Amino acid sequence: MTNGRLKWFCREILGREPNLESFEDKLIIQKTGYIAQNMGIGWNYDYGWYVRGVYSSELTVDLYDHKGKDLKYEPTEQDKKIAGKIKPLAGSLSGTEKYNKAPDAYELVSTVVFAKKAMNLSGEKEIAEFTKKAKPWFEDEHVEKAMKSAEGLG
């Protein structure tokens, strides 16, 4: 990717420049990037499934390629709308005793989106079963909140 769209998106979601030494920042960008792509941002990254969920090595390459570069990008209204829907997902697991931080929320919501889009699962029961099997450390309450949050993403 040669423009600053990804860099703009990272700053919009994190509220600052991403720290590529931080596993948490990279996880957030991977998961939110996948969600954004499925909502219509035309990045066309290939995503695979790994232990922590969806992952694109191409996105990682672009993140490191953009590091330290002052790339200009004027976001479209669609870009702003998509980022505006994704950013609040950071708090979608609030109120739960554990696994309630932004990386947890983005990881779980992206898993639900993956179940719907890549696995073509449509029933709530199917999606919940896949999500629980893929992420057994999350509790039923987490999965329910993530599924509810994913509903409004389109």
Image (cartoon, rainbow, N blue to C red):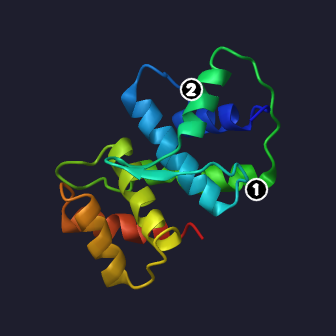
Image quarter where the N terminus lies is top right
Q: Is residue 5 left or right of residue 39?
A: right
Q: Residues within 10 Å of mark 1 (few under 14, many from 20)?
A: few
Image quarter where the C terminus lies is bottom right
**Image mark count:** 2
- Residue 16 is marked as 2
| Residue visible at 59% across and 38% down in the picture | 59
The amino acid type, in three-letter code, at marker 2 is Arg
x, y percent for residue 117: 53, 70
State if disc 2 and disc 1 touch (CB < 8 Å).
no
Q: Residues within 10 Å of mark 2 (few under 14, many from 20)?
A: few
Label 1 to label 2, Cα distance in Å?
A: 21 Å
Q: Is residue 39 visible?
A: yes
Task: Name above or below for residue 7 compared with residue 116.
Answer: above
Q: Is residue 87 visible?
A: no
Task: Name above or below for residue 47 compared with residue 63.
Answer: below
Give the quarter of the image for residue 7. top right
x, y percent for residue 68: 65, 14
Q: Earlier in the sequence, mark 1 or mark 2?
A: 2
- Residue 78 is marked as 1
x, y percent for residue 133: 24, 65
Label 1, secondary structure: give it. helix
Q: Is residue 83 left or right of residue 121?
A: right
x, y percent for residue 31: 48, 48
Q: Nearer the viewer, residue 21 or 148?
A: 21
The amino acid type, in three-letter code, at marker 1 is Gln
